[in-house]
Amino acid sequence: MKKITEQLRSGKIMISDGAWGTFLQQMGLAPGECPELWNIEKPDAVLKIATSYIEAGSDMIETNSFGGSRFKLANYGLQDRVMEINKAAAEISRKAAGNSKHVLGSIGPTGKILMMGEVTEDELYEAFKEQAVALFMGGSDAIVIETMSDIDEAVIAVKAARENTDAEIICTMTFERTVDGNYRSMMGVSPTDMVSRIIDAGADIIGANCGNGIEGMIHITGEIRKSNKNIPVLIHANAGMPVYKDGQTIFPETPDQMASFVKELVLSGANIIGGCCGTTPAHIREISEIIKKL
Amino acid sequence: MEQLLEQIAYCVEFGKINKLAPYPPDMKGQDGADELTKQALDKGIPADDVLQKALIVGMEKVGVKFRENKVFVPQVLMSAKAMHTAMDHLKPFFQSGTIKRKGTFVIGTVSGDLHDIGKNLVSMMIEGNGWQVIDLGTDVKPEKFIEIAKANPGCTIGLSALLTTTMGNMEKTVKELKEQVPGIRILIGGAPVNDHFREKIGADFYSPDPQGAVEFLNKQVA
């Protein structure tokens, strides 16, 4: 199988997958339950999610390991099972992906703030290394470090994955719209601030995920492209902002609505498009239909 | 005297903790909130003036800048650290009753939700505005909020949620608190939360930023 970056070189636009967290919730994951433990206890349910995205047309799927670092797993007393849980996550997605699709081992933030001294750089590096190695061993051919808001944490995660695995490294940050119409991460990082530091740390593909919806991603992609014309860009957008209705939270953007922005997103410079919170296989199918026609 | 208070307020606003602190870079080697607060008290400046004219002023400034997206989470965290360092010097005055808190605020992230960054920001801003803050942490069951609310008559409750799935638990917590502790004031916040949701679940106030929570609380005692 050719690497993702090699496949992109021909100008191909690739399709990633949709949400995992909100999908797991639909399948019965309760609030306060550890999503990653499902890799061990309910592997069939996790496989079902992975398979549904492959069937919808994804060229690559993530793993159920967003909160699989020892810091996040410690919330459930599972900090000693990082290898087992992450390896299982990658094995499940690899089973769905076969040998023709890519598996992106998902790594999310630790929730610890470096500058407050809650954690040291070495501790972060070790934690990301441990998780990335487990994901790689389980069959991930890429690692996606995502939903980052602190650039220093993102850089450490990229280095840890780069220096300890042979996977392609993807890193996406989460940006929100500020009152003056610009985009910044929670920690104040702009899309342009991100570009060179993440690439210098060793990322092959960069981008944005989560946030306010696909429309804002067009602006964010444009900002990234202003600083770098060549680096492949991956976008995982939410299906809009959550709305609370009758005791349930729904993400309002329909597959049609989301897909209507895809062309513009590609024109602004995105190379890989998928979804984040609230997106479903139906969203991915619709997005892939649009991309086929481009 | 006034100048010293202004300097403390400046240190809090810009997050200058003490002389050794490297942040902010343009204040390297200068006295920070720690040293200046000690100097102020040694010179006989009333502790209440340090609180009202320096700490609260500095925290309000950073709170407003945060709301306007002129500063982000790191700056607020550094300001809060500077405020805490100064507050440590004021502790004996709170204990002796020389200075009083405005009231009690009880905060926690609702049941099933382990996120704490937003909750901590709000907690620090409110403490830095002169309130007694009881932080119950994350994954707090409704019963816990009820117990603490009953033990602190007149307190205001703050509920935080980051996950869309725990918004339901926020609704449940509000309902049970309102039933069990009549007249309790509840304010809510968190990424997926908005004022429409607040109205729906019967909470008293929603703020998209910590400073809004501070202003709501101050109105209750004005």
Image: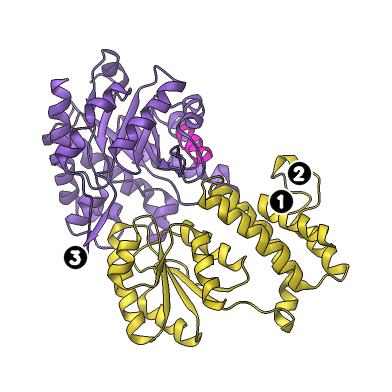
Tell which subunit mark 2 falls on.
B
Question: Which residue is depicted at the point 87% across and 71% down?
Answer: B44
Q: Give the structural element (helix, strand or loop) at label 1.
A: loop
Q: Position of residue A285 (x, y in %)?
A: 13, 35
Q: Which residue is mark 3?
A: A246
Give the chain letter at badge 1: B
Q: Amino acid at mark 1?
A: Lys
Rendered colour, chain A: purple
Chain B image colour: yellow
- Quadrant containing the N terminus of chain B in the rendered view: bottom right
Tag 3 secondary structure: loop
Q: Are marks 2 and 1 in contact (CB under 8 Å)?
A: yes
Give the residue drawn at x 75%, y 58%.
Answer: B8
Quarter of the rendering containing residue B127: bottom right
Q: Are marks 3 and 1 in contact (CB under 8 Å)?
A: no
The image quadrant of residue A165 is top left
Q: Residues within 10 Å of mark 2 (few under 14, many from 20)?
A: some
